[in-house]
Image: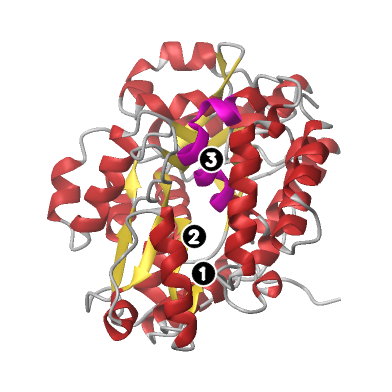
Amino acid sequence: MEIPLSRRTLSRRTLLGLAAGIPVSAALTACGSSGPGKSNAGATYWYLNGQPQEGVRAGAVDAFNKAHPKTQIKDTTFQNDAYKTKIKTAIGARQAPTIIWGWGGGTLRTYVEAGQVEDLTSWFDQHSEVKQRLFPSSFGAATVNGKIYAMPCETVQPIILFYNKKVFDHVGVKPPESWDDIMALVPKFNAKGIAPFSLGGQSQWTNMMWLEFLFDRIGGPEVFQAVIEGEKNAWSNPAAITALTKVQELVKANGFIKGFSSITADSNADQALLYTGKAAMMLHGAWSYGIQQSDGGDFVSGGGLGFMNFPPVEGGKGDPGNTVGNPAQYLSISSKAGAEEKKVAKEFFATGVLQDAEVKAWIDNGSVPIRLGTQKLLAASKSSDFLQLTYDIASKAKTFVQSWDQALSPTAAETLLDNISKLFQLSISPQQFAGNLNAVIGK
């Protein structure tokens, strides 16, 4: 069995690679020797790897440890898809780390219902200054039955439609202003041997982003809200069937890169297709900007990357200013951790999360931190155009729908992702998709 590298070794290798201008894809790392949830160092913390985000997360931990030499946090990193399985297993076995990184929403609700995470409501009442410095909208996905169970952290991440300006100029076309424009662009790019859209379809959640926008643009936020509220046969809403049909029409028109079902998002192969000009467009999270910036050479600095909100669908009821994605990221505290571990975790929440250096690092990486009062820093950034777009989308959207696989329970989310893969592979019809998802509403 191959022994995974520790986070410290991985970070050194990553830094060396970045210094040399070499893109680095971080591998799954090992747990600390003291074991999850029980750390002689003070507290344990698991989070996602991959640059540039990993470097910012590690930097916040390093800064906290330097300021608290007697109460250290021991961090461990994982790739996105592997983490989702690992953390679920660890929590189920009551071996979770002290600090649990996540996306809030439905998954957090299952942790709460199982008594696996701390109720932080009274802590936030006692530390109102912590709550008051963060985007108010970030607390929705941290709240279950009126109580707060997670600390919002990091950045706001709406889903963005990215495009390669040089490819568009080469083909002689303009960015789409509607769904009809998207469909009209598909044959034009294919005729030039360029994939209209990059897609890491093996990761499944990347496919999901298309449905999130189509549901909203066609039927408005009420269509998915009916699923959240457990309404019978909510997935069979006519607007939902129309959205499911339209995405299959895009697949049938060869709208996505050939072999998209075997491409993973964790490898950033989907990102490379865009900045190398093999694909014209890509629907992805706002974090993609930082990846394009760090891995794409002069693609971003040279003005090659374009970005916009998802366009409207003709005749649709949804507000074109609405968005989908992640209102923030979230840190919970394992209820099974020891008293000292919980104390260290709460001190990290109060003095280690979104401090000035971390805020600046997120902005330098092309992200909008969820801390209030950063407008001047955003405006002064070399990425100000993208940051302003992100800030405007997130702050002005009448509805910011949380990513479906996080808003739903793990059981429903697993069924959702499995059926989305089948939908994109054209192995099930829109009606079959709806029927399969209706069966797990409320589960």
Tell me the residue that label 1 is attached to.
11
Q: Quadrant of the C terminus?
A: top right
Dot in front, 3 or 1: 1
Q: Please identify the quarter of the rendering in which residue 168 is found.
A: bottom left
Q: Which residue is drawn at 62% across and 38% down?
A: 240
Q: Is residue 329 visible?
A: no
Q: What residue type is labelled 1?
A: Ser
Q: Quadrant of the N terminus?
A: bottom right
Q: Mark 2: few, some, or many residues within 10 Å (few <14, many ≥20)?
A: some
The magenta region covers 209-225
Q: Residue 356 carries which label?
A: none
The first of marks 2 and 1 along the sequence is 1
Label 1 sits on a secondary structure element that is helix
Tell me the residue that label 2 is attached to.
54
Q: Mark 1: few, some, or many residues within 10 Å (few <14, many ≥20)?
A: some
* Whole-percent x, y for residue 105 in the image: 60, 31
Q: Does the magenta stretch include residue 428?
A: no
CB atoms at circles 2 and 1 under 8 Å apart?
yes
Asked whether, in this view, residue 10 is left or right of residue 373, the answer is right
Q: Closer to the camera, 214 or 31?
A: 214
Q: Closer to the camera, 249 or 166?
A: 249
* Whole-percent x, y for residue 142 in the image: 54, 26
Q: Which residue is drawn at 32% across and 47% down?
A: 368
Q: How far apart are marks 3 and 1 (CA)?
A: 22 Å
Q: Main secondary structure of the magenta part?
A: helix
Label 2 sits on a secondary structure element that is helix
Asked whether, in this view, residue 151 is left or right of residue 354, the answer is right
Q: Which amino acid does label 3 sit on?
A: Thr
Q: How far apart are marks 2 and 3 (CA)?
A: 22 Å
